[in-house]
Each structure stands twice: as C-alpha cells, then as structure tokens.
Amino acid sequence: MSGTSNLDKISQGRLSYNWALKSMKIISKITEKYEKRKPLAGLDLAFCLHITKETSVLIMAARKLGGNIILCSANPLSVQSDILEFLKDNEIIVHAKTKMNEKEYLENIKKVLNTNPDLITDDGSTMHLYCHKMGSKNVIGGTEETTSGINRLQVLDTKKLLKYPIIGVNNAYTKYLFDNRYGTGQSTIDGILRTTNIFIPGKNFIILGYGWVGKGISSCLRGLGAQVTVIEVNPIRALEAYMDGYIVSRIEEVADKGDFFITCTGQKNVLRKEHIDRMKDGVFIANAGHFDVEIDLRYIKQQDKNPIIVRPNVDSYNINGKTVNLLSKGRVLNLVGGEGHSPEVMSLSFGNQLLSILYIIENHKKMQNHLYPVPKNIDNTIAKYALEAFGIEIDNPTKEQLDYHNEVNIQI
C-alpha cells in the first residue's frame, strides 16, 4: 500500500467515523457523562468485534473514558480497510487486516490475549473461549454481543467452568429487539442486493430459523414483496411464524422450490447434501448466523473445487450439472456482503456494551464467575437515551396510577 493511498484511507475512515458518530447519540451521551471521571483509566480492554465505522465509535469512546484499547476482528472477512487505518492512525492497537484466512484470524485473537487484558468484549465468544484455554490471567470480566456467543458461554456456565463474570449483552431488550430484528433484517437485505442485485418481489425465500434474526429478515423480505417460507424445529417459534402469516414447512418439502435460502439458526449443517442436491439450477444460498457452519460447505466444495467467482462475494458451484450460488463464502452475509447494521441501531447495542463494561469495572469484586444478564437499569437507560436521540417524548404515570400499581388488594 502506498503512502498516498494509506492517507486516503485514513481520511475516508475519519469521514466514516464522523458519519456514524452523528447517528450514535447514545454513545455520545454516555461519553459526555463519564469522560471527566475517566473510569477506564489504567485498564487494558480487549475488543473482538467486526471492524466497522460503528465499532470505531465504541472504540474511540472507550479510549476517551481512559481505556487502553487493543482490537481484533470477530470475522476474517468483515474488516473495513478505511476504519482499520483510521484506528491505527489514532494509536489504537489493531491486530487485523482485510480478507484474512482462518489461521490469521485466530492468530490475531491470540495476539490480543497475549497482552493480558483486564476485560474482554467479544462478538461470538471465540476470544472468551481462547482465553479460557490459554488461562484468564488478568481478566476481571467480559461482555458478549451475540446469540451464538451466549449459547457457547451458557455451556461453560452450566458446567461451572467460567473463569470470570460475563454480561450477555445480546439478552438486553434494547439489543435483541432492535439489533437482531431490525438491524439484521435491513442489513441482510443490503447484503443480498449488493452481492446479487436480484429482483426480490415474487422470489421464493426460504428462511431457516425464526429467532429474532429470522423474524427481522422475514419481515423485511415480505415488505419487499417476496414469498417467505419459514423452517423451524422449535414448535413455539414455528407457531409464531404461522400466526405472523408465513408459510411454515419442513425443509425436505421446499428444497426444490426455493429461489433463495438464508440460514439464521446458530446450528451446524442445517443445509446439507440432501437439500442442496434437490435445489433449483441457479439457486442462491447464504448465511446470516455468526459462524460459517450452518451450510455444509465441505460438501459443496467437494463437488466443485474450482467455483466461478461471478461477482464479488458470489461463488458459483457446479453441483450435479446445476449452478449453486454461495454468497460471502457462507459467512455472515450482512457484514461480508453488505455494510452491516446502521449506526442508529448499533448505538443501542454498543450503548449496552459500554455501560456493561463500566458496570463490571465497578462491581467485578462482588460478582461471581457467572453469565449475567444486562442489569435492568442499564436496559432502561439505553431505551431512554434512544428516545431522546429520536426526539420522542412519552408520558409518565400519575401518582394515582403509581399508588394503584403498588396497592395490594386481597379480597376473600
């Protein structure tokens, strides 16, 4: 990379950071409240997150609060090069580069852990798991951003193997109701259009999984005129999808009917050989889950070792004489094929992250090695800040209503 192009990227990264900052007023409000106190002074904070403009706002806020920051990517393909150079120019230690392979991605996580950080903020819990394997050393606590990451940590928590307290940020109402649903819904559409530019109305989309991510994607696709079928193994979620007006089916019944398949389950091999072999010629398959395990990539790659790269992030495989288009190499579509969540929704998520970090710093000595939910007062604070940011005012209950709510009336 030449010096001139590097300077151009730093300038573009600064513009991107400022663009995101203007829409992330929750982070700005938290920063303004705590900046004078410098509550993170003297602490080494490790972040394993997607390196995007929104992440740069969180990182710079933590630095303003006094933290020493070291960062790596939560995905080998989601690093935005201008943000990478901008953060480095601002003396943030970053172990990452664009388009890493799996080995480089994991080695960078280890490099961050070798600095013996005091606190870990993770997206997917790969850093948390490596920290447990390598030894927790100085770590006093951590946070986790995603559903997939919390599922992994719950296994350790159940077995009483956690070595430090962790707050599961994903389980905050102000995270999953908005980030997972609206954020992933919109940004997955962004990923679909950037990678394929297909016409969505009338297309038959098969959504595997009806958690908050699946709900958001399904809703956005239906709004654009797509025909949406939901695949679920959870009977309550399947019933919910049916009541929401979607077709609910078994994957075997629709494998040969779908134009586009999107996995969002967090599970392994939900799209397998028996499904892929029956798919239409020209089908698109993509993943919206955190890890690249939901599609049987081994089978696909065994069938065609030299796929045609027809567009950026679109690999066309010849399988039994049919074309199967794999998007973003089976990695999370909205961040690899698209730009990720918008700043407004990430302000909610990262606001929870920042306040949870401050909570751990203040309370870690009385916390056990356990997976904790986000404290309710933090969740409510983020909701109030969000309403202020959107210019929305709401009513307060009257004294009479509060008294009525608090009354205990027992009639026999």
Image (cartoon, grey):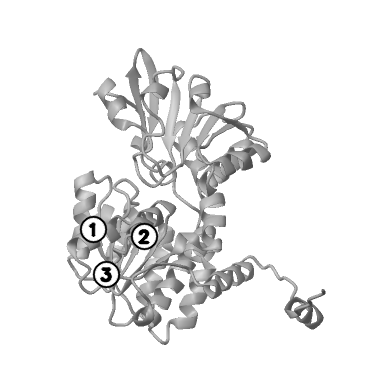
Q: Quadrant of residue 370?
A: bottom left
- Residue drawn 18% across and 62% down? 134
Quarter holding residue 359 = bottom left
Which residue is identified by label 2?
A: 158
Looking at this view, is 227 or 96 the one in front?
227
Give the spatial CA distance, label 3 vs label 1.
Answer: 25 Å
Task: Report the amino acid beneath label 2.
Answer: Thr
Q: For the residue marked with disc 1, what is the amino acid? A: Tyr
Q: Residues within 10 Å of mark 2 (few under 14, many from 20)?
A: few
| Residue at 34%, 82% in the rendered image | 365
- Closer to the chain start, of discs 3 and 1, is 3
Q: Secondary structure at mark 3?
A: loop
Pointer 2 and pointer 1: residues touching (CB < 8 Å)? Answer: no
Q: Amino acid at mark 3?
A: Glu
- Is 87 left or right of 111, judged from the image as shown? right
Disc 2 to disc 1, how far (Cα)? 18 Å
Circle 1 packing at 10 Å, graded few (<14), some (14-19), many (20+), is some
Looking at the image, do the residues carrying marks 3 and 1 touch, with CB atoms under 8 Å apart? no
The residue tagged 1 is 130
Q: Residue at x 36, y 41 (%)?
A: 331
Earlier in the chain: of badge 2 and badge 3, it is 3
Find numbered disc 2 in the image and state the secondary structure of the residue it sits on: helix
Vertical comparison of 238 with 378: above or below:
above
Considering depth in this image, is 306 or 208 the residue closer to the camera?
Answer: 208
Between discs 2 and 1, the one toward the N terminus: 1
Observer-nearest of 192 and 269: 269
Residue 302 found in image quarter: top left
Task: Indicate whether 133 appears above or below 257.
Answer: below
For label 3, the residue is 91
SS state under label 1? helix
